[in-house]
Amino acid sequence: MDKKTEPGNVQDVDAVIIGAGFAGLGMLWRLREQLGMSAQVFETGDGVGGTWYWNRYPGARCDSESYIYCLTFSPELLQEWNWSGKYPEQPEILSYINHIADRFDLRRNIKFNTRVTTARFIEDTNRWEVETDQGDRVTAQYLITGIGCISAGNIPDIKGLETFEGESYHTGAWPHNEVDFTGKRVAVIGTGSSGIQSIPVIAKQAESLTVFQRTPQYTIPARHETVDRKFLDEQVKPNYEEILEKARWSKAGFPVEFSERLALEATAEERQEAYEAGWAKGGHGFLWGSFKDIGVDRRANDTAAEFIRAKIREIVKDPETVEKLLPTDHPLGSKRALIDTNYFETYNRENVELVDIRHSPIQEITPDGIRTEDEDFEFDMIVFATGFDAMTGSFFKMDIRGRDNLSLKDKWAEGPKTYLGLQVAGFPNMFMITGPGSPSVLANMTVAIEQHQDWITDFIEHMRTHDIEVAEADADAESAWVSHVNKIAESTMFMLADSWYLGANIPGKPRVFMPYVGGLGTYREKCNEVADNDYEGFVLNAGVRQLAT
Ligand code: NAP
């Protein structure tokens, strides 16, 4: 659809795509260029980029190495694009996404500054009717969400929040102008991925930085550096397809070998040697490259956790700060694995202080700063690195209604229910890119996103060639998938931490493990099997009524 939708006019397109990040852009390209369909993308921001449009906080960069954090539908682009860092930094990722939008002429189908407010499935027409806050009304056969898993920001409801007279920011909604910390007394609340990346950078600029930590974290040095051009030119670019295939079928979307060794069968010296090697090399390889029982056996996990605690004791000079930083209440890797640049070292700076809010909780935010049980702090700025209402929050910002006017919010009141993380029973022809119940957030995101884009594209092509108007997850297939997702999560260490994977960071959110933990390769196999079996678990036609439960 080339024309802009005008308020009041109803436009008809084949597909509405929500979101113009990696997910929405790649989906638009596939539908338009591979299937010749018309599509309208709606995007809240005034530019493309999704996560990388919003998360502009200091130090923001991706934890996946740059050569494997990419869209792969254009082999030419893969060969031509040159990242400058080992890990891609936010400004560069954003310029990469902008390049994609320009190079493939994607902007003409995107309406920016436009939030989808409602999407209803109209049973008489078998079409979705989508409305936006700009007065657009569009109908489409398909509704495809590319709204991100970690995009609905969470600022905790702390007493006095609105009274603070200084500047305050959430890492996931960072301003587009530069925030200058020079000469400022800054507070950072939260020590997840965003906090751990921003704290060392803010500390270098601010007059003082006070970090409010609820849960101490395990984090491994990223060993970020400029990109290894020789490695890229000689090993990656000539072998890109092979490398990508390996990543696609791997556990987590990376072209790496997982260790087959068991920590509990190794001697103490062998373990120390393996952990030291992983620490020196840096990155997530510390986990997958050392021992395979770290993720499944608490005693094995303890050996790696203790190694990291020893590193914290070694790096951080002040014994009281060390005590606060030592993670002991959850296994390594049970919350999102972290990699950092000078995180623990930052606590040796004279201008940095750590406040343990487990022992001295925040009581309120005052006009001048933050009051804990024990102390009044004065600040010019508060940075909320307090995370997101992950996986479901961004869906609930819209009123999505399927058959029988059932709202997605009601359907998911006790936790998300999906078939393969791709569809929801009762919501025909709605596809989710990286929806809950898929491995997305436990994998390299671009690889997970493209698997969904390709699978959805194939499914829609199948529907078109077989004159299928409506595809809808079968309620029994959905229940079976939800049980499977829960069952495999139960046997893992992920259940032993209060993480956003479980919704534990949002007061009142049902405690349900949301991603599929069985691995990206296994999941891809399952999705392919479903397709090969004539889209088993989906009801394919125009007239079958599903009772949405
Ligand atoms: P997060 O991991 O959920 O961390 C939020 C932090 O805020 C945690 O330390 C949390 O403490 C704390 N917090 C939450 N509510 C609080 C409250 N009421 N009072 C005090 N502290 C509170 O959020 P994030 O750091 O923004 O990261 C979210 C996800 O985005 C990551 O897990 C990752 O998947 C993705 N991400 C990736 C990258 C990357 O690739 N490098 C960078 C940033 C984000 P508790 O731990 O006690 O809950």
Image (cartoon, rainbow, N blue to C red):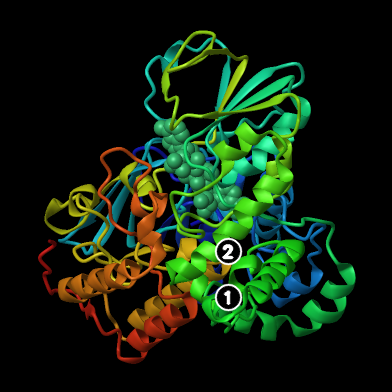
Residue 339 makes an appearance in the image: no
Pointers 2 and 1 in contact (C-beta within 8 Å) = yes
Circle 2 residue = 304
> Residue at left 20%, top 57%?
402
Q: Is residue 239 above or below residue 131?
A: below
Farthest residue to the front: give it: 268
411 on left or right of 464: left
Counting from the top left corner in percent of width and height, residue 444 is at: 57, 66
**Amino acid type for the residue under numbered disc 1:** Phe
Circle 1 residue = 291
Farthest residue to the bottom: give it: 533
> Residue 351: which disc?
none
Counting from the top left corner in percent of width and height, residue 331 is at: 46, 58
Nearer-the-camera pick, 119 or 477 = 477
**Amino acid type for the residue under numbered disc 2:** Ala
Counting from the top left corner in percent of width and height, residue 36 is at: 50, 73
Quadrant location, the C terminus = bottom left
Nearer-the-camera pick, 208 or 113 = 208
Residue 254 makes an appearance in the image: yes
Question: Is ligand 1 less than 8 Å from the beta carbon at label 1?
Answer: no
Q: How far apart are marks 2 and 1 (CA)?
A: 9 Å
Which quadrant of the structure image shows residue 253?
A: bottom right
Which quadrant of the structure image shows residue 104?
A: bottom right
> Residue at left 36%, top 80%?
464
Nearer-the-camera pick, 272 or 109 = 272
Helix, strand or loop at label 1? It is loop
Helix, strand or loop at label 2? It is helix
Mark closest to the chain's N terminus, 2 or 1: 1
Counting from the top left corner in percent of width and height, residue 18 is at: 43, 53
